[in-house]
């Protein structure tokens, strides 16, 4: 009859106190003085049985080592800065979400939640590409203006390029960081990644006008005042577009507003810390850098509201 199992296991996986066993050269334990025998009759396992016996023992040892050396899931380190009770790095359990970081930092009542920012490493690459493309467009515009003898436009493009070059690539991702909303809205309480940073700034007191202006203007915030009213207080450059303005709110939302008689949109109040970007005339960027204005506003939206000195 054909044996049910052509590859029998070792007779014993460990020394037996009963049979006084010892380990043989083949890696198996057996009673003292006895050769490994086959359960299908007299005789030894032979060369194949010896190899199988040793292999079984080694496999068992390997399995035990794997079970005892499997590392636990690593903790995620997240930094919380600004108006928080415990600024700095916090080690959170795997699977932690935004609320866990906000709770660990202890968000203070005077934190400016509208301007709170979530910075992520996986957003750095696309934002770096955005910055590089924007700088390329500005330098192209500058060189073209020089070639055409338009020194004023060339100087403006060079100044805007220097401004963009000095701004960091932040990795900002738009999402509410209000602890109450994070706790009550599962769709807002998103998973964290290692190296993420949460910024809770103080409430700003100004609005900034930038872009095609003679010089950037930092104006006092006035409640319910429109972007058009703020822009009117900042002298425009000759290359400025008089029909449109871009509004970058402190939460990173960008909107384009018509401000001329033919395209005027309803006035939109600005929040403290908002930026107004005055675009260049489309005729000047057509054929050179057609997306320059959209890209400039988009890159400004990645810049979080500044935290106070010593906020960490």
Image (cartoon, rainbow, N blue to C red):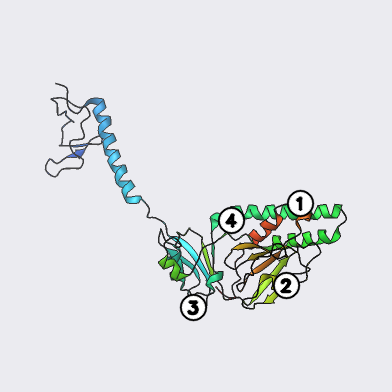
Residue identifier under label 4:
124
- Check disc 2: other Cα within 10 Å, few if <14, some if 14-19, many if 20+: some
Q: Position of residue 280 (x, y in %)?
A: 75, 60
Mark-to-mark CA distance, 2 and 1: 27 Å
Closer mark to the observer between disc 4 and disc 3: 3
Image quadrant containing the N terminus: top left
Asked if 19 appears above or below 263 in the picture, the reply is above
Instruction: Describe the element under mark 1 as helix, strand or loop.
Output: loop
Q: CA gap, disc 1 to disc 3? A: 48 Å
Specify which label sits upstream in the sequence, 1 or 3. Answer: 3
Residue 207 is tagged as none
Q: Give the Cα distance between marks 4 and 2.
A: 29 Å
Residue at 47% across, 71% down:
105
Is residue 296 left or right of 149 when viewed as pictured? left
Q: Secondary structure at mark 4?
A: helix
- Residue at mark 2: 217
Distance from the alpha carbon under mark 1 to that under mark 4: 29 Å
Are the residues flagged by discs 1 and 3 in contact, CB closer than 8 Å? no
Could you say which disc has been placed on residue 286 in the image? Answer: 1
């Amino acid at each position: 009859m054909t044996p049910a199992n052509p590859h029998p296991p070792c007779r014993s996986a460990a020394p037996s106190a009963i049979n006084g066993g010892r380990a043989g050269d083949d890696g198996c334990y057996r009673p003292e003085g006895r050769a490994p025998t086959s359960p299908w009759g007299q005789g030894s396992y032979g060369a194949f049985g010896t190899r199988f016996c040793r292999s079984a023992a080694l496999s068992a040892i390997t399995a035990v080592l794997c079970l005892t050396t499997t590392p636990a899931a690593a903790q995620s380190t997240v930094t919380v800065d600004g108006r928080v009770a415990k600024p700095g790095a916090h080690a959170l359990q795997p699977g932690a979400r935004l609320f866990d970081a906000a709770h660990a930092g202890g968000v203070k009542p005077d934190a400016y939640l509208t301007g709170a920012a979530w910075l992520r490493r996986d957003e750095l690459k696309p934002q770096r590409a955005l910055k590089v493309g924007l700088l390329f467009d500005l330098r192209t515009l500058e060189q073209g203006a020089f070639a055409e003898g338009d020194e004023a436009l060339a100087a403006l493009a060079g100044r805007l390029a220097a401004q963009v070059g000095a701004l960091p690539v932040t990795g900002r991702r738009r999402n509410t960081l209000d602890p109450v909303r994070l706790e009550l809205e599962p769709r807002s309480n998103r998973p964290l990644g290692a190296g993420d940073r949460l910024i809770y700034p103080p409430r700003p007191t100004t609005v900034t006008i930038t872009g095609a202006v003679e010089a950037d203007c930092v104006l006092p915030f006035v409640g319910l005042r429109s972007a058009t009213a703020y822009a009117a207080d900042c002298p425009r450059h000759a290359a400025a577009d008089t029909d449109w303005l871009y509004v970058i709110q402190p939460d990173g939302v960008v909107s384009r507003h018509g401000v001329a008689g033919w395209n005027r949109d309803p006035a939109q109040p600005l929040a403290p810390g908002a930026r107004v970007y005055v675009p260049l005339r489309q005729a000047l960027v057509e054929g050179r850098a057609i997306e320059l204005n959209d890209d400039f506003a988009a890159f400004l939206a990645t810049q979080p509201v500044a935290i106070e000195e010593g906020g960490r």
